[in-house]
């Protein structure tokens, strides 16, 4: 899953999928979520000039719900970058009511 809406540009998931389901973050107990930025395969370090660049991530940093707001602010996620925060959901019970047919939204 991803946190927030899909970014525009090369990582826009709306271009890859026909449908999406939006689930409020509040539906999940905090201890059932973890996050990686931009996702579990990449890291986004700042270079010496403060510019962002992507590197392959062999040991992703995992953030908890109470930490992710600072990550979004630090990297200006969704504001300047075309990356997203990957969300790992460790209990699918809170999501079940949202995956019924009536919750699906067309992406394209």
Image: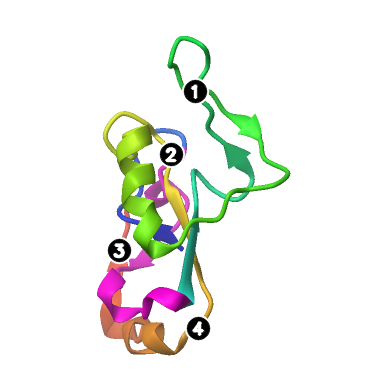
Mark 4 / mark 2, whichever is N-terminal: 2
Instruction: Tell me: residue 87, above or below residue 48.
Output: below
Residue at which label 1 appears = 46
Distance from the alpha carbon under mark 4 to that under mark 3: 25 Å
Say which quarter of the image contains residue 54.
top right
* Label at residue 83: 2
Q: Position of residue 104 (x, y in %)?
A: 31, 74
Residue linked to disc 4: 91
Q: Is residue 73 left or right of residue 51?
A: left
Q: Are marks 4 and 3 in contact (CB under 8 Å)?
A: no
In magenta stretch: residue 15: yes
Q: Nearer the viewer, mark 3 or mark 1?
A: 1
Which residue shows up at 46% across the image and 40% down it? 11
Frontmost of labels 4 and 2 is: 4
Residue bearing mark 3? 106
Q: Nearer the viewer, mark 1 or mark 2?
A: 1
Q: Earlier in the sequence, mark 1 or mark 2?
A: 1
Q: Secondary structure at mark 3?
A: strand
């Amino acid at each position: 899953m991803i946190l927030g809406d899909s970014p525009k540009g090369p990582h826009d998931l709306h271009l890859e999928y026909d449908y999406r389901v939006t689930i409020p973050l509040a539906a999940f107990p905090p201890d059932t979520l973890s996050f990686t930025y931009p996702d579990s395969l990449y890291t986004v370090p700042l270079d010496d000039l403060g510019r962002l660049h992507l590197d392959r991530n062999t040991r992703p940093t995992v953030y908890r719900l109470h930490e992710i707001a600072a990550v979004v602010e630090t990297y200006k996620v969704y504001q300047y970058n075309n990356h997203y925060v990957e969300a790992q959901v460790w209990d699918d019970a809170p999501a079940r009511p949202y995956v019924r047919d009536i919750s699906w939204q067309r992406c394209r």
